[in-house]
Amino acid sequence: MATMAFAALRRSLASKLAIGIGGLLALGLTTAQTLREAMPPASLPVARAEQPIEAGRWQLVIRNAGLDKAPRPDGSRGRPGMKALSVDLDLMNRSSESSNAFSRILSFAPPIAGLSPSPTAYLLRDGAILGALQPGLPERIRMVWDLPEAAAIPETIRVVVTGETFKPRDNLLAAPGWFNPKPIAAVTLPLRSESSGS
Amino acid sequence: MIRILTRVVALAIAALLLFALQQTTPGYSEITGPITQQGVAGTRINARSFTLRVEKVVLAERLRWQAFGRSYDRDTGGLWAVALVEAEGTPSTATLGGAVWQAASGLRFEASQRAEQAGGFLRGKRLEPGLPQRGLLIFEIGRDAARGAALLVSESRWPRLDTQLRIALPDDRIEQAETLDLDTLK
């Protein structure tokens, strides 16, 4: 009688232990996976200027970067006491519809102190502020960030390109869309000098 | 043995059925999406809040127009497609918020903001009842998107549970031009 009760106790203890260890293992695995996915990749693929980069819904070719006080493509001069950091690039919309979600595709690493959070994009064809890009029609554009006159800026900058992935159905509305921005590539660019800027 | 086999088969059939149901259930955005109304260029089509007739479409390499005391000249990497339309709000004032050129391949080109300053640009304008307005819907499209396309017009830019006209554009309604002066169209 006593041995049977003892055996039952041992069995239940063993099964509880197995369940506990299994659960902990699963928890640990998923946590590790989440952490790994949340971490930025250790080293970004390095791209060169003039080389096409596929970044989710955009394909871009970064041409050059410059720091200038000359008027912007639409003729405006920017706010007083500010200079402009500009990056020229060819941008093509790879998605199936018109889009104006291009303000976050470029960022700088290491970050440049004092930079305005988002750039103004100009369509060089018109010399006007860019509204939206039509699918499959590449355009030469200039992105301009404001920067205080006194801010120090290195000779070369490292531009990080952010891309998104397409989901045919999102989790909320089951609508197609672009999600999960991730750095895709990095391009190191020398800054055009002020005199040769356009 | 037979009983086990029938059970397995029944389970498999149930799983298949559930999978098919899951795959064919329309998503929320489809259920609450636009209500398409088919039409063809040249005829008057009634939406819930406006009526619209596409007279013709002109494809051009360059656009030119006068506005704010200066002349605008716009070229493009693709083609300009200018739709001459007549629209009216019914039964009350409506705004034409959504205008999309849908190519045969499925690409969707929204009315171009580059030509927004042109007089008669109808996207975003108010349509009054009893006062039919002639105006333009201007698109910048790819070269291979010109033929077999359709015009999607709706009151809001992203229509939900509201009419979206889908106007087929037959070839005999499409004209060609090298440089199109928009001021001669109206």
Image (tube, coloured by chain):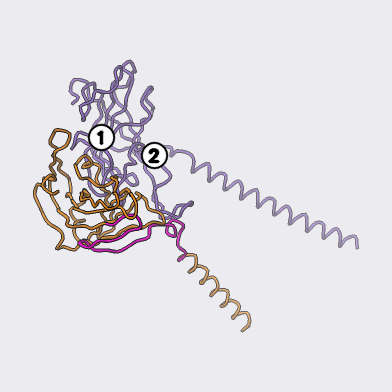
Chain colours: A purple, B orange
- In the rendered image, residue A178 lying in the magenta stretch gets the answer no
Residue A94 seen by the camera: no
Compared with A104, B49 (above or below) is below
- In the rendered image, residue B40 lying in the magenta stretch gets the answer yes
Subunit of label 2: A
* Residue type at numbered disc 2: Pro
Q: Where the N terminus of chain B falls, by quadrant?
A: bottom right
Q: Give coordinates of residue A171: x percent, y percent.
A: 48, 52
The residue indicated by pointer 2 is A183
As rendered, which of B87 and A128 lies closer to the eye?
A: B87
Q: Secondary structure at mark 1?
A: strand
* Residue type at numbered disc 1: Ile
Is A176 on the left-hand or right-hand side of A93? right
Q: Tell me what residue is drawn at x 85 percent, y 58 percent.
A: A6
As rendered, which of B45 and A5 lies closer to the eye?
A: B45
The residue indicated by pointer 1 is A129
As rendered, which of B94 and A103 lies closer to the eye?
A: B94
Q: Residue furthest front?
A: B130
Q: Give coordinates of residue B6: x percent, y percent.
A: 59, 81
Please report the bounds of the magenta region as a residue range: B24-51
Is B22 on the left-hand or right-hand side of B99? right
Q: Secondary structure at mark 2?
A: strand
> Residue A1: which quarter of the image?
bottom right
Subunit of label 1: A
